[in-house]
Amino acid sequence: MGNLQDKCVVITGASGGIGMEIARRAAARGANVVLLARSLEKLEQLKQELSTQYTQQDFYAYKLDVGKPKDIEVVFTKIFQDAGKVDVLVNNAGFGTFKQAVDTEIQEAEAMFNVNVIGLMACTKMVLPSMLQRNQGHIINIASQAGKMATPKSSLYSATKFAVLGYSNALRMEMMDTNIHVTTVNPGPIETNFFEIADETGSYVKNIAKFMLKPGDVAEIIVAAMLTSKREINLPGYMNAASKFYNLFPRTAETLGKGAFFKK
């Protein structure tokens, strides 16, 4: 349980869901943890919880909206001043909405790309130079199964996650001759407050409730992969198998899967 001893793990979107669970599990493995999110009050509560439980480790909390690149530069400069280094960056912050393409406003598309894609890239760019200088580090990007197989009413969200996968795959190849690892996490639906925005009617959650992943289970797998060369984490297995089938036989998959695709 001590494989992250004295390592610094930075987590965006750490105020709830899998971000919060990743923080707890990274701390349990000996890490010093930096918590980032828009809600400083929630972060301070989590910081207090971790500081009380793990008195020999350092914990930091900073308010950050990853949709604002200038704020990212300010906050990460502060992180390096306070924590000294970043060993693992978990780009977890993001949001989605379930709407048909015809109903999606361009302003909404800009906002989602700013958070899910541009913000992720900006955070990564802030830590890469020091990682390259030390020739070690790990970038973990939380993508989605929606980035492998798009479905109706997720055109915008899927587009952002396809972008995350493309960026991550290219970055991984750029880092091939270094000791910097790049991992993408592609989960299916998780029991978090993500759906409070994405699924306002609650119908999708109701339809898939028994299939939803537990945030703690997902976080445990992510933390176990930290500072390893794990390329991808795909959950659940059956959904990953479906995306592979889709890539091989898209027309057949769209025909056979129509009923499942339209559960939103």
Image (spheres, grey):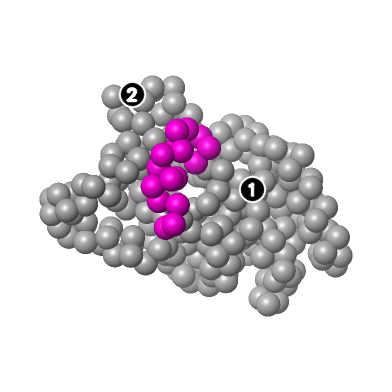
Above or below for 195 versus 215? above
Q: What residue lies at 53% left-to-right and 37% top-to-bottom?
A: 196
The answer, for residue 127, to whether it is visible in the render is: no
Residue type, numbered disc 1 = Gly
Residue 70 at what x, y percent from top left? 62, 32
Q: Is residue 251 left or right of residue 18?
A: left
Secondary structure of the residue carrying tag 1 is loop
Q: What residue lies at 27% left-to-right and 46% top-to-bottom?
A: 261
Residue 36 at what x, y percent from top left? 67, 45
Q: Which sits in the foreground, 174 or 71? A: 71
> Does the magenta portion include 205?
yes
The answer, for residue 254, to whether it is visible in the render is: yes
Which comes before the other along the chain, label 2 or label 1? 1
Instruction: Assess disc 2: are there few (<14), some (14-19) or many (≥20) residues with their C-alpha within 10 Å of its C-alpha.
Output: few
Highlighted range, magenta: 195-211
Q: Residue tagged by mark 2?
A: 103
Secondary structure of the residue carrying tag 2 is helix
Magenta span main SS: helix
Above or below for 252 versus 113? below
Q: What residue lies at 35% left-to-right and 40% top-to-bottom?
A: 264
Quarter residue 105 falls in: top left
Quarter residue 6 falls in: bottom right
Q: What residue lies at 76% left-to-right and 51% top-to-bottom?
A: 46
> Does the magenta portion include 236?
no
**Number of the label disc, if any, that sits on residue 16:** 1
